[in-house]
Image: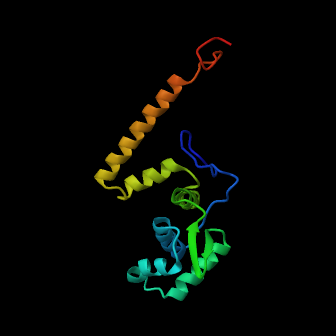
Amino acid sequence: MSNKGELTVTGNKRPDKPSVELTEAEWAIMRVVWEHQPCAAGTVQEALAASKGWAYSTVKTTMDRMARKGLLRTKRIRNLQLFSTTIDEVEAKRGEFCRMLKRAFDGALAPMMQFLVEHGGLSAEEARQLREISRRMTQAAKANRADAPHQGETGDGRAQ
């Protein structure tokens, strides 16, 4: 059930591409690959050694599975296998966010924001940043409405 005036996420903006769902391990690997691509599994293992302590075989096996799932693509140069991503970071974050929003807030953005504000999830600085984003979005929407042709006019201001 949706309240009047709520912003609701109804679907992916790119229906030709399914929503991306990554495990925690895949997120860790993708972050390294996004930063270093194309890169070998050894590069990823070295980057994650301090924080995860994963062995090379664990990283390589996970990356091979990710390639089979279509998250990574591979390119072989002699004995070296290089990995790069098939999705960008924004697309992965969008998929993760939309799943969370749908599960926890039935897809409605306003109740999520209310929850964050009421339950101490936002610092004063984060609240200020959100107000600034909201202000910019409102200004952009007003500018778009002012630039759009009025009903019965063409794009150049002439009557139809």
Whole-percent x, y for residue 46 in the image: 43, 81
Front one among 59 and 19 = 59
Q: Quadrant of the C terminus?
A: top right
In the picture provided, is 119 more to the left or to the right than 143? left
Whole-percent x, y for residue 22 in the image: 57, 69
Residue drawn at (58%, 77%) of the image: 81
Residue drawn at (65%, 15%) of the image: 152
Which quadrant of the figure has residue 19? bottom right
Residue drawn at (47%, 81%) of the image: 45
Front one among 128 and 54 = 54
- Vertical placement of residue 43 versus 143, above or below: below
Front one among 155 and 81 = 81
Whole-percent x, y for residue 82 in the image: 56, 74
In the picture provided, is 52 more to the left or to the right than 92? left
Whole-percent x, y for residue 56 in the image: 50, 86
Number of disc labels: 0
Residue placed furthest toward the right? 16
- Vertical placement of residue 34 versus 2, above or below: below
- Vertical placement of residue 3 versus 156, above or below: below
- Vertical placement of residue 124 versus 64, above or below: above
Residue placed furthest toward the top? 159
Residue placed furthest toward the left? 124
